[in-house]
């Protein structure tokens, strides 16, 4: 037990030889942590939160640096055995991850401005033709896009 003076007070604590990262390397704790993160990743993937699942996987690998180093060693052996370029494989891996992110996170673009106003206008005036309301708001959207185009030409 060590004691250190802090502002004329003596504080004592037991000096543990193990840090937090070395404590979670215990196989039982590592298995439990991996199982919990696996459940989180599965839940995130079923709900369409693929970026969250990817970040949870990266966090799991960073929490267990020994496993990460073993994976790196095995992949390096395979790269050397098959005589692949590590830069090329890294580029392919990064492209694959970015492609997955684009495929699973991109939503179709739709005109979002004036949608709530158009819905309100359709229900606010009873007996109004919905086709007429849609035509008016589409004209407003077109005028807005033309205005943005003229503004862009002025800037350039």
Image (spheres, rainbow, N blue to C red):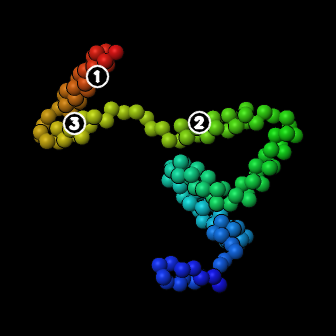
Please tell me whether residue 39 is drawn above or below residue 155 in the rendered image. Answer: below
Mark 2–mark 3 Cα distance, whole angstroms, equals: 36 Å
What quarter of the picture does the N terminus occupy? bottom right
Disc 3 crowd, CA 10 A, few/some/many (<14, 14-19, 20+): some
Task: Choose mark 1 or mark 2, whichever is in front.
Answer: 1
Sequence-earlier tag: 2 or 3? 2
Quarter location, residue 123: top left
**Which element carries disc 3, helix, strand or loop?**
helix
Give the alpha-carbon distance from disc 1 to disc 2, as whole Å.
31 Å
Residue picked out by circle 3: 118
Q: Secondary structure at mark 2?
A: helix
Residue 24 visible in the current orientation: no
Which residue sits at x=79%, y=46%? 75
Give the percent coordinates (x, y) of residue 132. Answer: 19, 28
Circle 1/circle 3 CB separation < 8 Å: no
Residue under label 2, please give it: 99
Upstream in the sequence, badge 1 or badge 3? 3
Q: Which residue is mark 1?
A: 148
Q: Is residue 42 above or below residue 17?
A: above
Q: Residue at x 71, y 71 (%)?
A: 26
Tell me: 150 left or right of 107: left
């Amino acid at each position: 037990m060590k004691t250190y003076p802090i502002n004329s007070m003596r504080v004592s604590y037991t000096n543990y030889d193990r840090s937090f990262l070395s404590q979670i390397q215990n196989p039982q704790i590592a298995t439990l942590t991996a199982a919990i993160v696996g459940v989180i990743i599965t839940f995130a993937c079923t709900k369409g939160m693929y970026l969250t699942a990817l970040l949870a996987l990266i966090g799991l690998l960073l929490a267990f640096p020994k496993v990460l180093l073993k994976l790196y060693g095995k992949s390096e052996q395979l790269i050397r055995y098959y005589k692949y370029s590590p830069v090329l494989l890294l580029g392919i891996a990064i492209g694959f991850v970015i492609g997955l992110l684009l495929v699973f996170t991109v939503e179709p673009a739709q005109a979002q401005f004036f949608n709530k106003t158009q819905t309100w206008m359709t229900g606010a005036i009873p007996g109004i033709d919905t086709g007429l309301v849609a035509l008016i708001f589409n004209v407003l959207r077109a005028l807005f896009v033309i205005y943005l185009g003229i503004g862009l030409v002025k800037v350039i």
